Each structure stands twice: as structure tokens, then as C-alpha cells.
Amino acid sequence: MPKRYADDYENVITTDDNGNEKKLPVYRGKYYRVALDEAGLARFKRNNLAALAAILALHIAAGFVGNPGMYRLYVALPYVIALAPLYNAVTGALRLPREARKYRRDEVGLSFERMKTAVFILTGLLAAGLLGEIIFLLTSTTEAGRGLEYLYLSLEALAAAATFLAIQFQKSARVQVLEEA
């Protein structure tokens, strides 16, 4: 359990029949609910995983293009750094729950919130990489490799469009704090 969620738990010491003491964490924090039913949660998870798979495939395919622009730091750096939020978005999507119930703060934070934050950061990094590629195309004087540059640019633009699609999917899952615990 990450340190930021430790305050939501209280360690209770219990004694079993043999006299052995055990520390058991008991959740004492707020509970949350998501405005989706079980079918909606399954559809939400499926749509987000499909969008993230498309982003991953397009992003990796763009890396294999071999365009001269990838030798520039302002194109390659956002490309490489974008893999970290992509990983976080995928791990958040894989941790999405399957059943509708009351959720603990760590369950919401490590799935819904992690995925939402990672996709927003990923969108910014893909936009920075696209901007870097456009700057490279505008400042490059050589005509050799232009086709590869346009291929890379189109693959990354499609990946960025898929992030906007993932953001649209995430708008359907509103996480709300429950008043009663």
C-alpha cells in the first residue's frame, strides 16, 4: 500500500486461539462510488483498454519509422518520456474494478485517478513531440526522408487523437465521495 493511503487504515491487533497476535489493517477512510453500473464499468474498462492499446501500437510504430527527426532531442525526448505515462495509464486501466460497489480511496486513486492523470500528461507529451516534429520539418533544409517524417507525424497525430478519445471515455466515470461510511 502506498504511503499516501496509510492514514486511511488503522492497525488493529487481534489475538487468535493460540495466543498469537496479528496486526490487521482496517479501513477507516472515506468510501467512493462511480456513476456506472456493472455493465457500464465493463464497457468503460474495455473502451479505455482499446484506446490505450491503439495509442501504444501507434506510438511504438512511430518509433520504428527511422525518420531523421528522431535524431533531434526536441523530437526524441518527448517520444521517450511519453512511455512513462503510457505505462501508468495502462496499469491504471488494468486495475479498474469489475463490480459496482463502494470503493476505498486507494482503489479509486490507483485506477481511475491514475489513468486520468496519466492520459492528460500523455496528451501533453504527444503534443510536445508533434510540435517538435513540425519545427523540425519547418527548419530542415533537406528533402531526403520527408516521407518518413510525414509518416512519423501522422502516426503520432493518430496516437494523440486516440488520447482525446480516451479522455472522452473517462468523462463517463464520475467518482463521488459517499457521505456515509
Image (cartoon, rainbow, N blue to C red):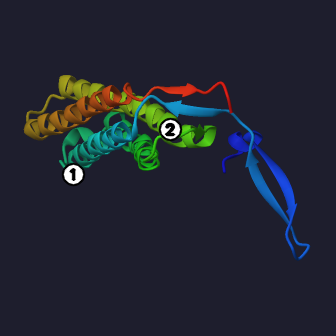
- Which residue was labeled with disc 2? 114
What's the amino acid at mark 1?
Answer: Phe
Residue shown at 54% from the left, 25% from the top: 176
Mark closest to the chain's N terminus, 1 or 2? 1
155, above or below 124, in the image: below
The x and y percentages for residue 105 are 62, 37
Residue shown at 24% from the left, 29% from the top: 161
Residue shown at 45% from the left, 45% from the top: 99
- Picture quadrant of residue 50: top left
Question: Considering depth in this image, is 138 or 159 the residue closer to the camera?
Answer: 159
Task: Say if residue 56 shows up in the picture.
Answer: yes
- Picture quadrant of residue 30: top right
Question: Considering depth in this image, is 86 or 131 the residue closer to the camera?
Answer: 86
Q: Is residue 142 left or right of residue 177?
A: left
Task: Say if residue 144 shows up in the picture.
Answer: no
The x and y percentages for residue 162 are 25, 33
Please identify the quadrant where the C terminus is shown.
top right
Q: Is residue 38 left or right of residue 6?
A: left
Q: Residues within 10 Å of mark 2 (few under 14, many from 20)?
A: some
Q: Is residue 131 left or right of residue 125?
A: left
Distance between the alpha carbons at the discs numbered 1 and 2 = 28 Å
Q: Residues within 10 Å of mark 1 (few under 14, many from 20)?
A: few
Residue shown at 21% from the left, 24% from the top: 139
What's the amino acid at mark 2?
Answer: Arg
Q: Nearer the viewer, mark 1 or mark 2?
A: 2
- Which residue was labeled with disc 1? 64
The x and y percentages for residue 48 are 33, 40
